[in-house]
């Protein structure tokens, strides 16, 4: 590769999105690339020519190791949708102009569905206008909802956080065994796809029975059936812990979290911010008189690099690395996919796939991986998910907390 | 020591309460004690003669190492207040009867203020009735509110979880720099004492500026001043993160979390379970139009043994160990205290202290450790808290999650 390259981060951050930047940097330097630039706040910042030189942070190998241990978008992220080409040629021309100014030959973009759309649009524009620059997508999303790829970097670490925290919550909740059970409802991210919520099942093992029920957004949420299930569990157990996706919807299409919000709007004249778990815990308390607790993992599940999956960190690095390799082979308009070759022992390779089949497509948990009553996952999910949370990378602890790499 | 011993756990669980059980077991076995029993669900279970033989779990040293890495009360906890002696002699006689039945010479009880009251009552009863059994308290509380002792086992690990999670939340929240800031309110445990909330300040370092404001329950919460502070921060920063105790109260004595609850009772006729952070985030959203996010650490902050402080684990072990040593020396009606001898390098010893000065007394964050405007901690707190979160003990990861020791 003769020219320079640039890498950007886009969309919601993950625990390992920075490992992909490290992978891009490492591969580019191996290929003799002179400058590896980072977009500051993704394509939105790039349009304002906001870039940094990654040599400043990563030339020393300890920088790469620290970057792998740093959560959230090191380069800064954005939520910027490329406008359609027709009538907005100026936006596209501006991007190519900035690329040419810095002699940038290849652009790598780490992100999910929306971000892959940016890669698609830019490569489409280049093809239509005879531009030689190349564009390769680097998959990243805790939601794990990109198609074609077996899974998405970012998911394994979020799943490891969820499985570990569920174990800890289940132990905590079962501490008091003499009294009536506390019903603990744990809300997990994933508005449309239940991959993250499904990861609650990975808390199971010989030392943990796992959550008592798991509700994914792939199935309609039946409030009566839920309440029956809770009562049944509470009658025979000294602790009840339930995992629920923030995106569960009742039959008429309303989100469960909207049920509270609607009532609140009537009463106070403004939006209430209670989540799904709070609403459900409140309903259980009202109907059963049991003590309840609502827990939301919130952004912790996507930011907890201190308990990231080593498999995930390595794969995030690999897809960044292989995006550069693909671009060096002349590929463009592609995303790197993870291709599983075996479950036990787990093996996974990569390839480059046409971005048009990926951008804006959302993949949900297969229906056959959800049990008939819709409250648990089958062994197929266990086989799929377990390898993705394996392995640990010890943070570098300084003064008692994990050290992060910070952009100046 | 000729007889056997028993150890119990009481009150809210912590990440390291089991390390104290390990310490009791190890010391007793060194002294040649035959049987080390565990109360199943504290004094409440003990009254029903529910005990287990710890040899079954800890005779193999890997059991001790696993126990140190297991959150929540391994033996099961309880919230049982001993009745006053007069008129309830039968309850006390029952306890001594069970002790005699199992040839138990010493009873060790791990807990906070209420649990130390149990130790006091039992030792008082023994003294008044010429009983020879001995009773020693083992401090344990994430709240860190026991007097006399420099700090309480359980606090350091909760503080490490809070400091680490705050760093991760702050990084996550600052990911999108281009738009208006998201105001993130993080609610931390501690209804009366602000020790846990103060630990948010320990997220600070050369790689993290820490939360933008910290509100402890030791100071009256002024809603107008809070809102002014938020607006001021939002005007100059691209990310605002605020730590707040669940126990903050406004001038008339109402908890902030009751403000929402009251309204909810008026509107729906039932209690609402929203927390302090949700209420504050809602008020900020209404007044400023900014995007807000409410996060509660909930039980995770007391159960996250996967990121426990090694200092805390070792000290929890030490106080359990030294309780046995004290009892072996004939002491009773005492609690083991941690006595700090130096901050940097940190040094800490133990001693045994009269339980009457400890039971039912609550210690708050000293006023002079809180800044004048009540929104931050001084360097004195940093000096105090930092050593308590130092060091890590790697969990034993099995199939991607930390392995716990479980009672059969």
Image (cartoon, coloured by chain):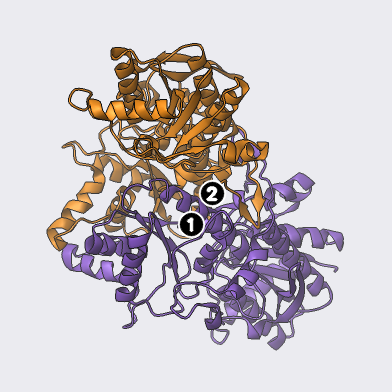
Chain colours: A purple, B orange
Q: Is B108 rendered above or below residue B305?
A: above
Label 1 neighbour load within 10 Å: few <14, some 14-19, many 20+: many
User: Most extreme residue toward the front, as rendered?
Assistant: B101
* Residue B381 horizontal/vertical position (percent): 45, 26
* Residue A218 horizontal/vertical position (percent): 46, 79
Residue positioned 33% across, 82% down in the render: A251
Q: Chain of mark 1?
A: A
- Helix, strand or loop under label 1: loop
Q: Which residue is mark 2?
A: B168
Q: Chain of mark 2?
A: B
Q: Is residue A33 left or right of residue B308?
A: right
Q: Which residue is mark 1?
A: A299
Q: Quadrant of residue A136?
A: bottom right
Q: Is A330 rendered above or below residue B337?
A: below
Q: Quadrant of residue A213?
A: bottom left
Q: Is A115 rendered above or below residue B265?
A: below
Residue positioned 65% across, 71% down in the render: A383
């Amino acid at each position: 590769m003769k020219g320079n390259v640039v890498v950007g981060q886009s969309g919601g951050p993950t625990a390992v999105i920075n490992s992909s930047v490290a992978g891009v940097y490492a591969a580019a330097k191996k290929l003799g690339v002179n400058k590896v630039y980072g977009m500051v706040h993704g394509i939105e910042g790039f349009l304002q020519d906001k870039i940094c030189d990654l040599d400043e942070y990563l030339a020393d190998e300890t920088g790469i190791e620290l970057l792998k241990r740093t959560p959230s978008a090191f380069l800064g992220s954005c939520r910027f949708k490329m406008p359609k080409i027709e009538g907005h040629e100026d936006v596209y021309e501006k991007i190519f102009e900035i690329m040419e100014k810095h002699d940038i030959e290849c652009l790598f973009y780490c992100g999910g569905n929306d971000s892959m759309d940016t890669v698609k649009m830019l490569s489409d524009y280049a093809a239509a206008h005879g531009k030689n620059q190349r564009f390769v997508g680097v998959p990243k999303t805790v939601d794990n909802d990109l198609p074609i790829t077996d899974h998405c970097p970012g998911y394994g670490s979020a799943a490891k956080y969820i499985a570990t925290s569920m174990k800890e919550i289940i132990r905590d909740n079962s501490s008091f065994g003499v009294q009536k059970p506390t019903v603990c409802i744990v809300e997990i991210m994933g508005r449309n796809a239940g991959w993250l919520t499904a990861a609650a099942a990975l808390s199971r093992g010989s030392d943990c029975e796992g959550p008592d029920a798991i509700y994914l957004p792939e199935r309609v949420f039946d409030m009566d059936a839920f309440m029956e299930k809770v009562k049944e569990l509470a009658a025979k157990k000294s602790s009840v812990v339930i995992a629920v996706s923030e995106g569960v919807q009742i039959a008429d299409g309303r989100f469960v979290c909207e049920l509270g919000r609607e009532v609140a709007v009537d009463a106070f004249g403004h939006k209430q911010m209670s989540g799904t778990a709070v609403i459900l815990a409140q309903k259980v308390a009202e109907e059963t008189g049991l003590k309840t607790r609502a827990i939301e993992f919130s952004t912790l599940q996507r930011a907890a690099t201190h308990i990231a999956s080593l498999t995930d960190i390595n794969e995030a690095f690999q897809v960044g690395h292989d995006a550069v390799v693909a671009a060096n082979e002349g590929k463009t308009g592609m995303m790197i996919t993870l291709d599983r070759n075996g479950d036990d022992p787990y093996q996974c390779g990569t390839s480059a796939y046409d971005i048009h089949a990926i951008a804006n497509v959302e993949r949900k948990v297969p229906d056959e991986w959800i049990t008939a009553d819709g409250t648990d996952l089958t062994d197929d999910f266990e086989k799929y998910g377990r390898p993705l949370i394996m392995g640990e990378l010890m943070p570098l602890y300084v003064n008692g907390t994990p050290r992060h790499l910070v952009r100046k």
